[in-house]
Amino acid sequence: MVEYCYTLSYLSRYLPAYGVKIFFMKDRLTEEQTQAILQALDEAIAKGPWEESNFLRVIGKNLREIRQNFANQLGLSNQHEVQSKNADAQNQKERTGQQEVYISLYSMDGNTLQTWERILANLPRQMISRPIYENEQDVINHIKSKTNRVNEAYVAAYVSKSDILEVAADKISRDKFGRPLLSLKDRSLNLDNITRFVHMSGTYHYTKGRLIKNTTSGEG
């Protein structure tokens, strides 16, 4: 307990005062305040000297856990509502000529959730270099073939069928194992149509630029 309090004291150098009070204020925070706190935590994680010593690495790890736990708690409060809305949205998309595709992602810093969030934010502008699969099992097998899986992930997202380019059978792109890849029109991905982000650490909802872990997925 003393060590934890000291950690919070050290973190206060990098966080606004409200940043270290989130454990006591969660039920009274507005959406604007929660977003401000998440931003403050992200900035502290990015700017702090967390690699300069073993002690600081422990503090940096604690800070990332604090950030993730806070984000998870926010997601739990309306989890059933989110799941219901996602199900309704999925059904609606299926009725309006859309198809779910699976986009393979890579990060050199796969342990840091904020890195994945930045990748997702830029994904609509960086689709050309990403392997895109029609079948989910194909992207799963693609990731299983990698040595360092912590740096691999994928997103499932709905796109308009009209945005999937038709390619002659002998011109279809394939990965190194011969699995077929899809080609999409430029900027055909809408971030609101991402249904889930899947990483070895678990499955996440993507909402308002944040990844919220799905604690009912049974993945850890």
Image (spheres, helix red, strand yellow):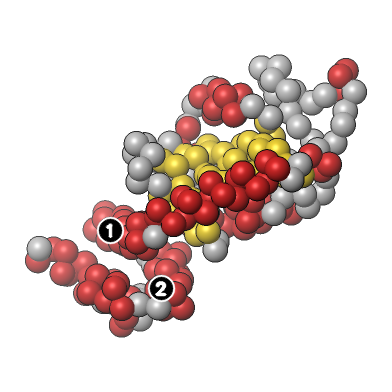
The x and y percentages for residue 113 are 45, 52
Q: Position of residue 50 (x, y in %)?
A: 35, 61
Q: Which marked residue is nearer to the observer: mark 1 or mark 2?
A: 2
Disc 2 crowd, CA 10 A, few/some/many (<14, 14-19, 20+): some
Q: Secondary structure at mark 2?
A: helix
Q: Position of residue 74 (x, y in %)?
A: 37, 63
Q: Which residue is mark 1?
A: 62
What residue sits 82% from the left and 43% below the top?
163
Q: Nearer the viewer, residue 34 or 111?
A: 34
Q: Quadrant of the N terminus?
A: bottom left
Question: Of all residues shown, which one is farthest toward the bottom?
Answer: 17
Numbered tag placed on residue 6 in the rendering: none
Quadrant hosting residue 56: bottom left
* Residue 183 image point, x, y percent: 79, 36
Measure the C-alpha gap from mark 1 to mark 2: 19 Å
Compared across the picture, whether 181 is left or right of 58 comes to right
